[in-house]
Amino acid sequence: IVQLYSPLHFFGTYYRMIQQNFVDMENMFDLLDEKKEVLDKEDAQSLVVPQGKIEFKDVNFHYAPERPILKNVSFTVEPGQTLAIVGPTGSGKSTIMRLLFRFYDIVGGKIFIDDTDVQDFTQTSLRQAMGVVPQDTVLFNDTIFYNIHYGRVTATDQEVREAAQHADIHEKILTFPDQYDSKVGERGLKLSGGEKQRVAIARTILKNPAFILLDEATSALDTQTERNIQTALQRVCLDRTVVMVAHRLSTIIHADTILVLRDGIIVERGRHEDLVSDGGEYCRMWQQQLEANNNASSSQAGNETQ
Ligand code: ATP
């Protein structure tokens, strides 16, 4: 009995882990196809050639009825625009991302993609249109080539290399013992957080999705790596609709819209300059980050003179 149950238990556990942590959901979903909790409508249509518009209209959501998580959340992201979501831990930022990927069905309101209810699309076509760059990319125990090629299995070798170049990881791969044929993952080469993220970006470039869901890494990487990743991200985000959960406000200065979420309610919205001059919650967060940065750089300077 234990043997019979353990595979199911395994899938159930992983399904929840992916839902929860937004870890490489694209990969995992292929592996776990049979464990879907959200079902397609019988006459569900394919989301082909997406224009890239997202709309949340009075969205209400809870994981458990006694605890509402999102309360009347409304926003629109026009094709090609970037929406950044900020707010304290537990405010519901990742939940919005999970709903876009339709991990769960909402309990009130509507979510539209290109003016059509997400529930009218097949989940496969919806997820095909979304590229995810998670905080923590899990690599397959396979070659680096395989890990990038996965983004679009019909891609040629040349396209894989170009994607790696655009993601700023190509040069690094050439230093590996077997270059693109080098094994990575748990049983192969260990890549740093920044390298794994660039593999995820290369994979997303290859996938060429209309939407990018980006979960920014909480911890800042060293300055050069950070710069490389920002450049790679800017390339992949160009001309696509981007929804990002942001932790470092410096990365969202140019976002078209910033939503400040608190306890599942949008408490402020606007562009960076406007929110800063409004002097509200966002402004406080911004000042806190500036102070933290100043303290970090002055202690750095102190160290250097010692
Ligand atoms: P963080 O910045 O820490 O990632 P967040 O703003 O992304 O936080 P969410 O992950 O969206 O927050 O979670 C919102 C709330 O929903 C939290 O209080 C969390 O405990 C709760 N929650 C998240 N997932 C589940 C779940 N599967 N079942 C029950 N409650 C959940």
Image: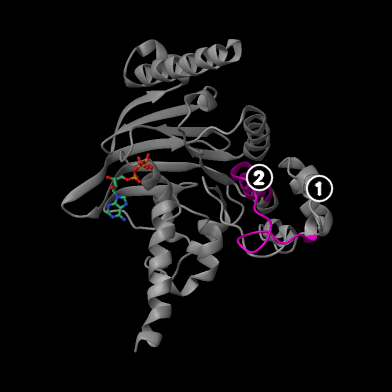
Q: Would you name the residue on which mark 1 appears?
A: 175
View extreme (bottom): residue: 1
Q: Is residue 46 visible?
A: no
The image position of residue 97, as x and y in percent, is 43, 46
Nearer to us in this view, 134 or 298: 298
Q: Which residue is mark 2?
A: 195
Residue drawn at (63%, 59%) of the image: 185
Distance between the alpha carbons at the discs numbered 2 and 1:
13 Å
Binning the other alpha carbons within 10 Å of mark 2 as few (below 14), some (14 to 19) or many (20 upward) gives many
| x then y, percent, for residue 10 | 42, 73
Question: Is residue 95 rendered to the left or right of residue 130?
Answer: left
The magenta stretch spans residue 99? no
The quadrant holding residue 43 is: bottom left
Q: Callout 1, which amino acid?
A: Thr
Looking at the image, which residue is at 47% across and 43% down? 54
Q: Quadrant of the N terminus?
A: bottom left
What is the quadrant of residue 227 in the picture?
top right
Q: Is residue 230 left or right of residue 119?
A: right
Q: On the picture, is 106 further left or further right than 100?
A: left
**Looking at the picture, does residue 297 appear above or below residue 177?**
above
Between residue 135 and residue 244, name the one nearer to us: 135
Upstream in sequence: badge 2 or badge 1: 1
Q: Is 75 positioned to the left or the right of 61 in the image?
A: right
Q: Quadrant of the C terminus?
A: top right
Can residue 262 be seen in this snapshot? Answer: yes
Q: Secondary structure at mark 2?
A: helix
For badge 2, the amino acid type reads Glu
**Callout 1: few (<14), some (14-19), or many (20+) C-alpha neighbours within 10 Å?**
few
Q: Give, as a single range, the part of the protein colored magenta.
A: 181-202
